[in-house]
Amino acid sequence: MHVKTTDLCDDYSTELAICKQPLTTYGKKKSFAGPISTVKVLEDNVLVKKSLETIPEGHILVVDGGASRNCALMGDRLASIIKKRHLAGVIIYGCIRDSADIAQMDVGVLALGTNPLKSSKKGEGEKDITLTFGEVDWEPGSFAYVDEDGIVISKRKLV
């Protein structure tokens, strides 16, 4: 089911937060929606991988990478987990790599940009916390709706 963010804004504007951070779509899936799960890391993707392997099916993993462009927080191997586990998608406030491979996958992936360098593997960071970027709060359990026009967030499921 494709839900247009523009229609949600028309019908629920008073309930929505609109992400103002420009992000680029990398996967084949341009539209996705689901409950939010969160991770906050800095140049370390261990918790990103663990979260992709454990969050519930249908969820969107939102990763606050501190807007770092120094390395990638996800590549093609982690992106394949999205498909395998039937996750809605991933939104990364940071970079990815293997973008040509991810572009061929039927997954929803948004990120600030790309960097070919892999991240460190220290396992540092936090999960299941409220993140703030793009002038919105990303609260675990809230719902995100994503399409080519942007990202909107609601405290409840709208459709």
Image (cartoon, helix red, strand yellow):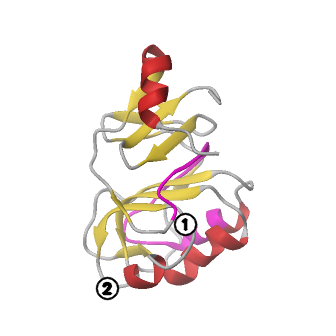
Q: Is residue 155 left or right of residue 131?
A: right
- Residue extending farthest to the top is 14
Q: Between residue 21 and residue 132, name the one nearer to us.
A: 21
The type of residue carrying mark 1 is Val
Task: Return the mark for residue 116.
Answer: 2
Name the residue rendered at 39%, 83% in the picture: 100
Q: Is residue 44 above or below residue 60?
A: below
Name the residue rendered at 53%, 36% in the picture: 139
SS for dot 1: helix
Q: Is residue 99 above or below residue 16?
A: below
The type of residue carrying mark 2 is Pro
Magenta segment: does it hold 154? no
Q: Is residue 56 left or right of residue 102?
A: right
Q: Between residue 39 and residue 11, name the one nearer to us.
A: 11
Q: Give how far apart the Cα atoms at labels 2 and 1 are.
A: 17 Å
Name the residue rendered at 49%, 79% in the picture: 104
Name the residue rendered at 56%, 58% in the picture: 89
Highlighted magenta segment, given as a residue range: 29-52
SS for dot 2: loop
* Image x and y of residue 151, in percent: 41, 41
The picture quadrant where one finds residue 149 is top left
Task: Return the mark for residue 48.
Answer: 1
Q: Is residue 89 left or right of residue 75?
A: right
Magenta segment: does it hold 32? yes
Give the quarter of the figure containing the C terminus.
top right
Which comes before the other along the chain, label 2 or label 1?
A: 1
| Residue 10 visible in image | yes
